[in-house]
Amino acid sequence: MASTALPLPDQPPEASALRPRVVAAYAATAGPTVILSLPFSVYLPPYIAEGGVIAVGLVGLLFSLTTIWDGIVDPLIGSVVDRVQPGIGAHRRWMLRALLPLALLLLLIVTVGDRLPFAALFVAMIFFYSSFSLYEVAQLSWGAALVRTPADSALLYGMRDWFSKIALIVAFAAPAAAQLLMPGISLQGRIMAYASIFLIMAPVALFAIGRIPPRAIMVEQGIGWRAELRATLSFPPLLLLFGVQFLNSFAFGSLTSLFIFFAAAVLDLDTQSALLLFASFIGGALASPVWTFLARRFGKPPMMMAMGVLTSTLLLATLAQPPNGFAQAAGFSMLLGTGFVGLLFTYSMLADLIPQDATRCGRNRSAFLFALLNLMQKFGVAAAIAVSYILLDLIGFDPKGDGSAARGLHLLFALQPTASWIVMIGLLVLLQRRLAHRHAPL
């Protein structure tokens, strides 16, 4: 077991304020993984299916199995980061070790992934997503080790979120630019254009990693899974935060899984759906610094509640008056994107809870807890996709049909994420009360 980010005895206590250069460097280290997250998965399954080596039905099985693998390996990776390789700079070492295999496996997948048999591609993707998780968990837990106050955590993870949105805009623009410059470019060409942004983000991250102050990890022997489980289940604020993460991810996953259908069947903008999705990321990039300021000023749970209310109100408003034409739809997408900043709040709230958890457990479990938080995000998105497609089938929606079920699709698009955010707000109220009772507001 481990204690992560506890100051060494011979070091003086640090000031609570973060230096701007540390905040900027930390945000930049998120680039390699953020561009390979959910948006990359939008391109990857069709690219593999187009190769024809793996049947379409098996492509779905492939990604389901990798999700199950994530559920197994993420907590293990968190424990490894917490408990292996003690001393100053361990977070940095884990990130550097994950970056090289991540780059090599990305190169393999985007060049010959569509020609690999099922077993070979499955193994490649297992190691690819394991490297991804190792880098991200080490990066997130390093952030928790850098902050000393709730205002610091809001600033650090807020700027990480802002940089992530900008990186996604650049990554999404790459396939569009490739298609514009090379008409008729294949799907593989477009996914290679998207992945090529990794060649920019990786050197930037390497430079930034060297500019972040190292923090110590002090290791104790033993795994102690029963103790880990008891410690987690006996801390209600932590369980409430995991529920908040799952529900917010479920709402976000619902929107992303239904957005293309909504644009085509309800807005009649099938050919512009990619641009509308792109507009939502622009809205998120513009809004992220604002949400960061508000979270530092008014607290994270209230602002996350406000985010849920804002996005739900926008969705419900479309039931009365859907956007008319591309200009209105683009404006709606940008406004909707301003609410896609949930990770800003959940990551920084967990960073604030980690010292309390460490006091209870006698050790710091930051990497393990961030791994669990990421797992809740993945499960939320996966559950949303599964539920959305089941409900689409129940209402009789056919993407190639005559649009007779468009009203049902519209109701699903608006009400499913709204219901998830309503329950999320209830959990946030309980979380805030728990924290107020402990005299430790976020």
Image (cartoon, helix red, strand yellow):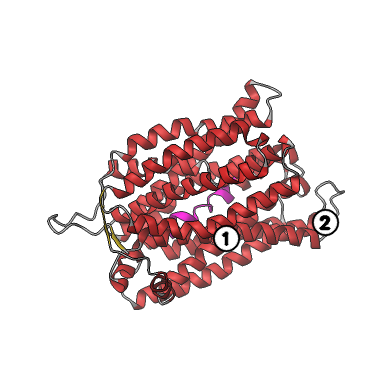
Mark 1: secondary structure: helix
Quadrant of the frame with the C terminus: bottom left
Q: Which residue is mark 1?
A: 379
The spot of residue 414 in percent (x, y) is 68, 59
Q: Amino acid at mark 2?
A: Ala
Residue 343, magenta (yes or no): yes
Q: Earlier in the sequence, mark 2 or mark 1?
A: 1
Q: Position of residue 3 (x, y in %)?
A: 28, 62
Q: Secondary structure at mark 2?
A: loop
Q: From the viewer's perspective, is 346 left or right of 312?
A: left
Amino acid under disc 1: Phe
**Residue 441 image position (x, y, % from top left):** 34, 69
Is residue 330 found left or right of 132 in the rendered image?
right
Q: Which mark is residue 405?
A: 2
What secondary structure is the magenta-colored segment mainly? Answer: helix
On-image quarter of the N terminus? bottom left
Q: Position of residue 372 (x, y in %)?
A: 46, 62
Q: Is residue 313 left or right of residue 432?
A: right
Q: Tell me: residue 288, above or below residue 419.
A: above
- Residue at 46%, 39% in the rendered image: 101
Q: Residue at x 36, y 54 (%)?
A: 81
Image disc number at residue 360: none
In the rendered picture of this protein, how many numbered marks are placed on residues?
Answer: 2
Dot 2 alpha-carbon crowd within 10 angstroms: few under 14, some 14 to 19, many 20 or more = some
Q: Is residue 31 visible?
A: yes
Q: Nearer the viewer, mark 2 or mark 1?
A: 1
The relative height of residue 230 versus residue 385 in the rendered view (above or below) is: below
Tell me where the magenta segment starts and ends, as one range: 334-348
